[in-house]
Amino acid sequence: MFIRWFIRWMSYSIVVSLIALQTSAKNMRTSAKKRNFSPRNMLWSKSSRIDFKRNCSLQRSALVSNILSQTLYPIYEKYQLKIPRRCIFLQERNIYRGVEMGKTELSGGHIKCEFCGKLFENENYFYKHMDRKHENVYVFNKDFVCLSDYCDIFRCDLHEMYPVNPLDFDVCNKKDVRKLQRKCEKIIYTCLPTEMQHYVYDSLTKSLCAPLNCNNFYADFEDVSIWYIAFMLMLVPATFILFLFVLWCCNELSNDDSEGNMLYDKYEKEKFETTILKGRTDYYISHNQVRRR
């Protein structure tokens, strides 16, 4: 009797457990579908993704990606080379690559989201929108890269503060800058193709690593407008003074000419009167001589 009751109880327990597991799996699939999680995102828990996003700045990663688009990638296109998978600057490894693909810049500085069609006034609002609505485009896999981790090489602080005045910063530490340059060169070395040519390495290091020295560290970000304003402040008064000097010279020349003309006219008048007077005198003298005869 007891054995029969035990078998029946075990059967009911197994059936209930199977039904519960099936329902739970169905709910998980439905939840994942609603939240639009892809398999690559399921490798990371929600808490892990939130922690990662706090440590990986979307704005700074986008800044580094933009710098790479202007410096690194054109060199590979020029020499028709492919970036190896081990390179951390490979576009496919950028965790926020989907964000850049979904961004379209419009006139007036507006940004359009290609995933939903919404328009935003600037990039900050666009990035906040991507964090809230389109997290599924982030690349969470085993070899993803957070580009903002390399902001020291790309001088993100200076890019965000542009334009800058080098006098506002401490004296350049040659030792620290040299470490940055070596770090940059090591990364570039991992980004070289298998059949490396020296001119490719030279082009890459010149484009990314060469500015990392105390002579050129602030060169691309200097506030040249200060010198331009100072020059203009000196040029405008100098031009005005020169203009007044030219007017004064012209006026003096005009006065000299007028005075000279007056003297000349006076001289001519006196000469004319003298000639007339002399002519009359000669006439009277000759006339008197004739009468005396």
Image (cartoon, rainbow, N blue to C red):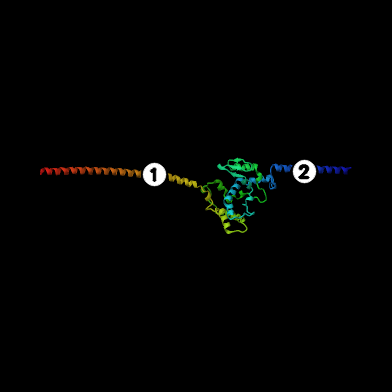
Q: Using the numbered discs, state the Cα–Cα distance from disc 1 to disc 2 in whole angstroms.
A: 93 Å
The residue that label 1 is drawn on is 243
Q: Is residue 70 left or right of residue 18?
A: left
**Residue lying at 18% horizontally and 44% vertically, measured from the top left:** 279
Q: Is residue 190 left or right of residue 257?
A: right
Q: Which residue occupies the foreground of this view, 97 or 63?
A: 97
Where in the figure is residue 21, as x and y percent of width and height?
77, 43
Q: Which mark is residue 22?
A: 2
**Residue lying at 81% horizontally and 43% vertically, measured from the top left:** 15
Where in the figure is residue 45, as x and y percent of width and height?
69, 46
Where in the figure is residue 123, as x and y percent of width and height?
59, 43
**Residue lying at 61% horizontally and 49% vertically, measured from the top left:** 147
Three-letter amino acid code of the residue under disc 2: Gln
First along the sequence among labels 1 and 2: 2
Q: Which residue occupies the foreground of this view, 168 or 33?
A: 33
**Residue lying at 16% horizontally and 43% vertically, measured from the top left:** 283
Three-letter amino acid code of the residue under disc 1: Phe
